[in-house]
Amino acid sequence: MPEGHTIHRLAAAYRERLGGGGPLRASSPQGRFADSAALLDGRPLAGAETHGKHLFLGFPGVPGFPGVPGSPGPGPATGWVHIHLGLYGKVTFGTGAPPEPVGQIRLRLAGRDGWADLRGPNTCALLTEAEKEAVHRRLGPDPLRPDADPERAWRRISRSRTPIAALLMDQSVVAGVGNIYRAEVLFRHGIDPRRPGTSVSRAEWEAMWADLGLLMREGVRTGRIDTVRAEHLPEAMGRAPRADAHGGEVYVYRRAEQRCHICTQRIRTTELMGRNLFWCPGCQPQRVLV
């Protein structure tokens, strides 16, 4: 499933390719979004916004979609396409006239100079601004949003005996963090992923929050996840670059049984709440709680 930086890049791509202010042709070749696409047809894309792994495309003046005075958003946009890619969703962009539809295209948006096809999302729904705000309220702070309040996440973490690794993946606690960022930020701060939230200090949390912002902003810039500090890069250590379909230089993610770049102990893995967890027992020692 794409992590938050990918969705921010996707929002930027929609703005750049289709957000010029001209009317768009909206359709649902698959048919599952046809009624909503008909309401959007002929309207411009007024904005693209992201919160964690959720993307919102705004369209002004959708019939029957009342605005909420004072709600955030791009000007008069009152209808929002809410997209969550899930495990299988993807968006394809193209220039010029769109080709004949092939496969299960949930939503096609086409403008004068290009088009975008959405396939296989977990969620694709047309929301009012009030409904959109309800989605925001149920999500935790997103390290990539300027309005994010890390104190909200800290209140949840500091009161919970759930493992910190699980809390970081809970989108109602922190929005946008996925399996890679959670494994890597915990390693970078020497925190055993199995520690309960109540054992994490405020200083540890503030350092992790700041680091998540730095790492994820770099992910937005480059389109890949790199978490290894300069002194541990392949060229600095004289080691081979990482060979993995996910790309990016990492410390522990999907490196089970390989040697840690720092302490040389073997990376360990286990399953936590249905997801694979990776950590280094040397650099992330267990803490004895009394």
Image: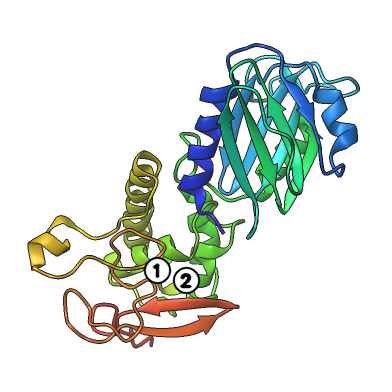
Tell me the kind of residue under disc 1: Ala
Q: Residue at x 30, y 65 (%)?
A: 250
Q: Horizontal placement of 283 versus 256: left or right?
A: left
41 to 259, vertically: above or below: above
Q: In the rendering, which numbered label is found on residue 165?
A: 2
164 to 136, vertically: above or below: below
Asked whether 140 or 201 is in front, the reply is 140
Q: In the rendering, which numbered label is found on residue 183?
A: 1
Q: Residue at x 50, y 39 (%)?
A: 8
Q: Horizontal placement of 142 versus 211: left or right?
A: right
Q: Quadrant of the C terminus?
A: bottom left
Asked whether 186 or 248 is in front, the reply is 248
Q: Residue at x 24, y 83 (%)?
A: 282
**Quarter of the rendering containing residue 204:** bottom left
Residue 42 at x, y = what percent?
78, 16
Tell me the kind of residue under disc 2: Ala
**Quarter of the rendering containing residue 232:** bottom left
Q: In the rendering, which numbered label is found on residue 39?
A: none
Asked whether 91 or 168 is in front, the reply is 91
Q: Residue at x 73, y 34 (%)?
A: 100
